[in-house]
Image (spheres, rainbow, N blue to C red):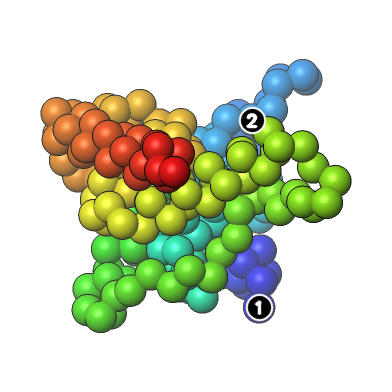
Amino acid sequence: MTMVANARTLTIGAVPLSRAAQLAYAPTMDTAPEDSALMLRYRDGDVAAFEALYRRHNDALYRYLLRLCHNRDAAEDIFQEVWGKIIKARDKYRPTAKFTTFLYRVAHNCFIDHIRRNKRHTHTADIEPDHQPDTGDCTEMQVERSLARRRLLDALQQIPDEQRDVFLLREEAGFSLDDIASITGTNRETAKSRLRYAVNKLRAAIDEPAGKS
């Protein structure tokens, strides 16, 4: 069953939106509704609002989890678990923070739970770079860019989980240090320190091959 189908199933029996509620959530003509407004609409029974949220965030969330886990099966399991928790949490949802902060906090916690459930947690290199150029047609620059990206993906798996998590939240998802601290349950200085260590280690790992003869 798809995630949207799950959302529809779990909403059956909900009280339909009143006309007043619909008007309260109505977006302006040229402005897409904010995430929090969509989640509130979904909380009140509007399944289409969940579908919009899912389409808006599913690709970025999956990329984050795939690079965090470096294992496609694990990433897909956690991805399903995250959206399942979002669906179940709709009745208690309150827009006290940005929806993306809420979403990625759930994802972070699901990843931590996954590690705890799988104490022999290892990273299986079963993902490929986003672009695989044809070496017969591509330029030297494209080849070097592809190799650098592969070195980055490989280096990501050599740093501690908490540093990789912070790096991906910053570079992949674009969160601020304050948001990262909220998502990971740490303070800003801890998040900043982890990010600095991650960047330094990744830079060293990427630069090392280039310096070898």
Image quadrant holding the N terminus, namely bottom right
Image location (x, y in percent) of residue 180: 30, 36
Image location (x, y in percent) of residue 101: 39, 39
Q: Is residue 17 visible?
A: no
Element under disc 1:
loop
Image quadrant holding the C terminus, namely top left
- The residue drawn where x is 34% and y is 63% is 110
Mark in the foreground, 2 or 1:
1
Which residue type does callout 2 highlight?
Pro
- Quadrant assignment, res 109: bottom left
> Which residue appears farthest toward the right when viewing the image?
137
Image location (x, y in percent) of residue 176: 35, 26
- The residue drawn where x is 71% and y is 37% is 140
Rendered position, 82 above or below 28: below
* Tag shown at residue 185: none
Camera-nearest residue between 115 and 206: 206
Q: CA distance from mark 2 to mark 1?
A: 27 Å
- The residue drawn where x is 65% and y is 50% is 130
Residue at the spot of label 1: 1
Which residue type does callout 1 highlight?
Met
Q: Is residue 62 visible?
A: yes
Camera-nearest residue between 67 and 182: 67
Residue at the spot of label 2: 33
Camera-nearest residue between 175 and 97: 175
Element under disc 2:
loop
